[in-house]
Each structure stands twice: as structure tokens, then as C-alpha cells.
Amino acid sequence: RPPPAAGGAKSISHYPMNGLTSSWQPLARQEHVLILTPITRFYEEYWNNLINLNYPHELIDLGFILPRGREANQAIQRLDEAVNALQTGPKKNRFASVSILRQDFDSPFSQSEKDRHALSSQKERRAAMARARNSLYTTTINAGISWILWLDADIVETPASLIQDMASHNKAIIVANCYQRYVDHGESKIRPYDFNTWQDSEAAAKMAQNMGDDEVIFEGYAEMATHRTLLASMRGAGKDINEEVPVDGVGATALLVKAEVHRDGAMFPSFPFFHLLESEGFAKMAKRLGYQAYGLPNYLVYHYNE
Amino acid sequence: RPPPAAGGAKSISHYPMNGLTSSWQPLARQEHVLILTPITRFYEEYWNNLINLNYPHELIDLGFILPRGREANQAIQRLDEAVNALQTGPKKNRFASVSILRQDFDSPFSQSEKDRHALSSQKERRAAMARARNSLYTTTINAGISWILWLDADIVETPASLIQDMASHNKAIIVANCYQRYVDHGESKIRPYDFNTWQDSEAAAKMAQNMGDDEVIFEGYAEMATHRTLLASMRGAGKDINEEVPVDGVGATALLVKAEVHRDGAMFPSFPFFHLLESEGFAKMAKRLGYQAYGLPNYLVYHYNE
Ligand SMILES: Nc1nc2c(ncn2[C@@H]2O[C@H](COP(=O)(O)OP(=O)(O)O)[C@@H](O)[C@H]2O)c(=O)[nH]1
Ligand SMILES: Nc1nc2c(ncn2[C@@H]2O[C@H](COP(=O)(O)OP(=O)(O)O)[C@@H](O)[C@H]2O)c(=O)[nH]1
Ligand SMILES: [Mn+2]
Ligand SMILES: [Mn+2]
């Protein structure tokens, strides 16, 4: 299914949405996937992992969005170079299309790990992220897209079959477990990184009850003991990588979504939605729209280690 | 600004969002407008009014969405004929592009006036409308679009300068006052039609406070006396057509929206959002995103009279 005609003979396009599937066998059905990445820094390792994904590149559209500002200027330059090299290289490696959006607003914070993760920064930061994600998908989803893969720009390692693996679960929303590699006394180890995928708890529900409409619960901060069950903590070494668990909040580091979920209106709230922002609020909104999110405790992807 | 490249040389597109304006002078800046119409019945009068809009057609993309089902089969046939005739006719009349989407679900109700407006039908009906609108804009907004004009398929008369007139107010969201022509004892008269544009009231706020998350307030039903101030009732005969008033709920019969509002994530809730659905919920969500909606009490458009 081609993207909308742009200035063709009569410029009329018909899109029967019931002809568009998002199935557990996307490859067999030649389903189109849109990979979306908000990006402030360009990592070689992200790019190499991306181009090594073994879902056919001609079935993949890429979309990037960058904030204004100097750091993003550098990122866009390196992204441009990488994209240009790829799209003029061997045909089989090329992606179907690449869209690079530049926001009309800057990222609200310096991008050092410490600043980013300070609790005081979270509300403004997650709101900016949400707006970036919404602009990105709204502008790039066309009528031919079956799946959206949200993949953060600092995800440096995934299985090459990421798309096929996650789609095989046939869930409307499914998220990998985002870990990080590090070296401890010369030994290579892994540790949890993303705390945004969780199952809700009574403590969090109680916290929410006593909050005003504009207050937000953030996960992973000692100041707010939510006692939610984190996907990060559900991993069992050597356990089935296909194990799936229902979740109430999701992170968007490596998140596969059936396009109909976004088409139905599930977006990333930049305002507190049931006291949740951005990807966590997205899962809640999707639930209100009738879609249940799932996490994969033993299926790991790795975040860059700054 | 052209729509995203589809399979061009390298298929790489750059979209600096700060180069995209939605200004009070869209014509002078050659801004692109996307007209979106959910449609179950095709009215000749709607089509004639649409093609008489005097904003340059080459700056206008059209998007339609139809449900499944027999009635829509007839509508799509007539729409196709009209579109084909226009897009193969004189160049100056042609629109930049026309996208026709067909839902994968049927409209939940028969479309007779009485059935549509029964209070018992509203929740399901407005939810289906919301889903249709969300699919439509998500699939058709591209990076070149500055404005979205929501125009219902049964709006049969507007000023030819509708787009310029509404844009000149330079509001993120602005809605015309939707009336209906009828004949009374051989005399042609007008009466209010759309009650979805209103300013909130204390009575409605109190009603909301005592409701569960899933309950909805519908406007225009005696069973639910909201005492909201309706745009329909603010009209003054012979008064300034440029008068504008802030509103808290909007109807979508003739609604002009800056594209950034949808890009930021404002959608049509198909679930109760602050006890509001669809276009009324859209205004509330936009407000949460920082956008205020306005209504034009003396600027009239006319709904078909069944
Ligand atoms: N476009 C855009 N991307 C952002 C912004 N802030 C962060 N990002 C990107 O969004 C993703 C997640 O942000 P990050 O700061 O890594 O979140 P963390 O991993 O939770 O610390 C990464 O790919 C970032 O490069 C922003 O303001 N605008
Ligand atoms: N695609 C789609 N369009 C619909 C559906 N129901 C109504 N419409 C269209 O949406 C617009 C508003 O609906 P309508 O029934 O006229 O609402 P009313 O004017 O408030 O009675 C009209 O253009 C209808 O043709 C639906 O289920 N799917
Ligand atoms: Mn990160
Ligand atoms: Mn109508």
C-alpha cells in the first residue's frame, strides 16, 4: 500500500482501512512499519543497530524529530550524513522514506543525565517529550502504515529481529525491557534502566486519589514510593523471552504500537492525564480507548551508558 | 511546502516546523489548508458550497472518511463521481489532493434525524464520530499543512470566504455559528442547529463533580439542564460578524484549527474526558494543552434541513 499520492494525475487516493492489517506475521503480509525516534544526540551505536534490523528496509519508513538548539544542530548534521550515505548506497539497505522534523521549540533542559533525571525537571521535560512525539507521529503516519515502532535515539542494542519478535505477540501495544550494560570491576554486567513500564499498585492509586488534577506521579523516585511492580524487576535470568505481562504504564524506549491505536486517538499527554504524563499517560489513554498494553520482562534492549 | 516525498530520489525530507506558519493572512503566505469531512450522506449542496470556497484550491487538500454499510456505499459512489469530475476538469478548480478513507467499522446507528439525536444514542454515536475524526486527521495531516478546517457533510451554505474569514481572527481554534434555514408559513426563516459550542456554567460544573469518570454531560437535552451559555443563543441580528467569544466546548460543523493544535496532541475523545466526548472534549483537551477556543456568534453557516 503506497503512501498518499502527492500531485499524481488526479491526486485522488482511496484508503479502505479494513484492507490494512497489523498482524502477528507482518513480514508474510508485507506490512509497513514506521520507526519514530525523537533525538537530541546522535549515537553511532543507535544507527548501526537500526540499520541492522532485518525487517525489510523497503517496508520501513523512518521519522526523526529534533529540538532547536545547539546540541541538536550537531545531532542533525550527523544524522543527515548517516541518512544520506544510506539512502544513496546499495538499494537493499535503503529505507522506504526518511522524514526529519525540526521542532519550533528547544528542549527545556540541558541533556546531562543528572539534570534530565532530577525529579524537579520531570514535569517540564516529559511534557516537551510528549509534544515532540505527538508532532512526530501526527505528521508521519500515512494511510499505508500498519505498525509504529517507537525507538529512542539512545537505544544502542536490540535483537535484529526486534520488529518481527515484538509483532509476533499480536498485541496493540507491546514494550521491551530496557536495560543498560555497564562494567563492574572489569566485569560486563547489566542493570535495569527504564522504570516507566509498570503494573499499577494500590499505593499509587491512593496517592492519585489525594491529588489535584494537575499533579503527577513519577516513577523511580524515592520521594514518591508508588510500590508499583516494575517491568525492570520482573526479569528472570534465563527465562522465556516470549513471556508477556499486562502493564498499566509504558516507557517508549522500544515500544511497538498497532497504527490503529494512534489513529483512534491515543496520544502522549503533555498535561497530567490521570496523573500521568507522556508514555505512561499514553498507556492509560490507550486503555480508555480499549487497548491493553503488554511488557516483555525477558526480552531486553539496551540503553546507552553515558 | 510540499507533502512528504514518496519514493523520491533519496526519499529524504526535511521539515523545519518553525518555517510553517498559521497566520491571520493565510492567503498572503500561501498557507496550506486541509479540509476534513466525516460523511455518511452525500449532499449536492455541500459539494457545491465546498467547490465555491474562494481560497485557492491548489492550497487545499481534502480528506473524507466514510463508515462501512449500505448508506455509505451510496454516498461514496456519489462522492467519487463528484471528485473525479472536478479533478479532471479545469485546472484552477482542482484541489491539491483528495483522500477518501473507508472505516473498518460501521456507523452505530441508522442516520435518521430522530435516532441520531435521541439522548440514549449519544454516547455510542459521538464515540464513533470521534474515532472517525481521529483516523481522518491522523492519516491526512502532513508536514506542509498549516490549518485544518473541519466541515461536516451536511453544511450546505457558508460564505465563500469561510477560510480567510475564520483565519483572520488568528485563533488556534475558531468555530462558526451553525444555524438551519426552514420555511414557516411560506416565509424563509433561520433557527439555531448546533448546540455543541458553549461557555461552561456552574450548574454543569456541579453536575460533573457528582459524576463517575465514565459519565457524560450532553448539551441540548432537557433531561440534563446544564444552563451553559450556547453560542447558538448569542447571535444578535445585524450584529458584527467579527465578534468573537471564548468558548469551552465546540461543535465541529465548521471548525478551523491551527495544525499545531492537532500536532500537539489535541484529539477527539471517544471516552469521557472531563465528562465530555468528541468535539466538546476536543476543546477541553486543547485547553489542557494551552489553546483557547473561540466562537463567532454572528458568523453563520447553515446545516441541511432533513
Ligand atoms: N525531539 C526531542 N527529542 C528529545 C527531547 N528530549 C529528549 N529527546 C529524545 O527522546 C528520547 C528519550 O529522552 P531521554 O532524555 O533519553 O530520556 P531518558 O532515557 O528517560 O533519560 C531520546 O531519544 C532523546 O534523544 C526533546 O526535547 N525533543
Ligand atoms: N465517517 C463517519 N461519519 C459520520 C458518522 N456519523 C456521522 N458522520 C458524519 O459526521 C458529521 C456529523 O454527524 P451528524 O450525524 O450530521 O451529526 P448532527 O449534525 O449533530 O446530527 C456529518 O458530516 C455526518 O455525515 C460515522 O459513524 N462515520
Ligand atoms: Mn534515554
Ligand atoms: Mn449534521
Image (cartoon, coloured by chain):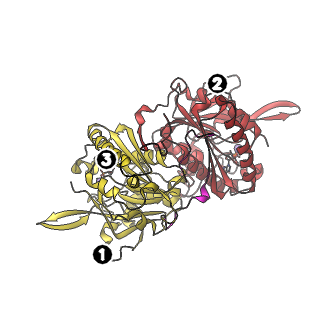
Chain colours: A yellow, B red
Coordinates of residue B262 in the picture (x, y in percent): 50, 43
- The residue closer to the viewer here, B247 or A171, is A171
* Left or right: A126 in relation to B170: left
The span picked out in magenta is: A1-26
Mark nearer the viewer, 1 or 2: 1
Observer able to see residue A276: no
Q: What element carries label 2?
A: loop
- The residue closer to the viewer here, B103 or B170, is B103
Q: What separation in Å lies between label 2 and label 3 (alpha carbons)? A: 54 Å
Mark nearer the viewer, 2 or 3: 3
Coordinates of residue A257 in the picture (x, y in percent): 46, 59
* Left or right: B85 in relation to B133: right
Q: What element carries label 3?
A: helix
- Kindly identify which chain the residue marked by label 1 belongs to: A
Q: Is residue A264 above or below residue B9?
A: below
Mark 3 and mark 2 in contact (Cβ < 8 Å)?
no
- Kindly identify which chain the residue marked by label 2 belongs to: B
- Ligand 4 sits in quadrant: top right
Would residue A22 be counted in the magenta stretch? yes
Read off the residue under disc 2: B241
Read off the residue under disc 3: A82
Read off the residue under disc 1: A236
